[in-house]
Image: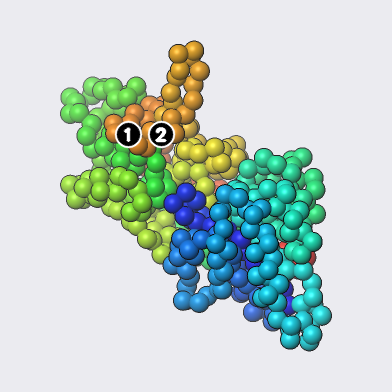
Amino acid sequence: MTRIYFRTDANSDIATGHIMRCLSIARACAQISLQQKKRVQISFLVSDNQSRALLSERFETAEEFAIHCLNSDYRYMEAEVHSLLAYINDNTDDNIALSDNSALAKPWLFIDSYFATPAYFRMLSADCRIAYLDDLRSFHCPVDLLINYDTDQDCPCYAKAAHKLLGMQYTPLRTQFQSPVYHVRPKASHVLLSTGGTDPYGIAEYLLRTIYQFPSIPDKEYAKNDGGFWNLQDISLLQSLQYHIVTSKANTRYDNLTALALENPHIHIHDNVSHMASLMASCDLALSAGGTTLAELCAVGVPTISCLMADNQRTAVENFSSKGIIPCAGDIRPVQTDGNGRQSFDHAASDTSGIQLPSSVIEAIFKFMTYMSQNSSAREKSSHAMRAFLDGCGAERIASALLTL
């Protein structure tokens, strides 16, 4: 029997993407073991009850996987080692161990957390085989299995990893993103805006207000808006499109977005989406922040432009862009300049009103939308390249490694 424990969290500070990709891999492990008639035991370990609740809400059935709460501080993972190992040892079925020698092998501990450290790995390595899903490349990873799907480039930090799975083909997407049906329509009408469940910089609202509150201007004249120039024809085109905003009630601007949707029938709010692939497939274009959503859009084949809104998104965003798959409009974060002329990103901008986002990024987004919406052949070419690049089977590849190594 193969025993696999997924150690991850989600709370008000940690995005749910961590538990979602672990769930995808866990489900792939369960499916493969069923197909191959292998015995596998899968459990989740979380730090607190908030993580437990957010995880269980995303189960397909009420008791899809066992969850054990460590009652620990997710920021100091080394302090939880004793209770974690105690649970794993107590959870070992002696009857199975006696009847199946393979059960005596060390279990897998699959870690998906930015708070893991080399010391944490070393403290656990005597009792567990360690798998680590990394996207930061910021420290040495003495683990049995290292996964980084943001890049196919190896680095010195991974020198001590026994096995490595690197590259976009290992992106752990949900089953719905395997071979989804997508058609490039002759006329583009629907645009997906995926700027994160919390959208800390208010990108969706800012873009929509820029489009629909654009000042009236005479035909054939140009108007200046935040440093960019668009003619009336372009603005009319943007205003004619249908905008689908993927968000959540955790977005501090949720009420503002809802009010905009009530005022304008071209704006649609989507939260708690269960089948994201279908929503994506209904759209002709997309704007997305960096993260797993880019890979999902790639698997579906929706022509997309990205924007960077967090440092840990940079590798993936630049990788998609450098390969000519998904262009990047730039870093959306407002920039502050101190008295010495040094620039830094304003991470507190989400707490203020009247944010002015970088005009060059907004202009790049609008140029992409106007050009692609009028050019079906360009959308066809983009969609084909995206689907050829990423097939959505990354979770199965990772699961196969866990079940065979």
Badge 2 amino acid: Ala
Q: Nearer the viewer, residue 195 or 219?
A: 195
Is 258 rendered above or below residue 21? above
Q: Nearer the viewer, residue 221 or 172?
A: 172
Disc 2 crowd, CA 10 A, few/some/many (<14, 14-19, 20+): few
- How far across and how far down the image is residue 107, in percent? 73, 68
Q: Position of residue 6 (x, y in %)?
A: 62, 64
- Label placed on residue 218: none
**Residue drawn 23% across and 24% down?**
220
Question: As drawn, is 76 to the left or to the right of 305?
Answer: right
Q: Secondary structure at mark 1?
A: loop
Q: Where 335 sits versus 6, above or below?
A: above
Inspect the image, locate mark 1, and give the three-letter code of the amino acid beneath it: Thr
Which mark, residue 348? 2
Q: CA distance from mark 1 to mark 2?
A: 8 Å
Q: Quadrant of residue 204?
A: top left
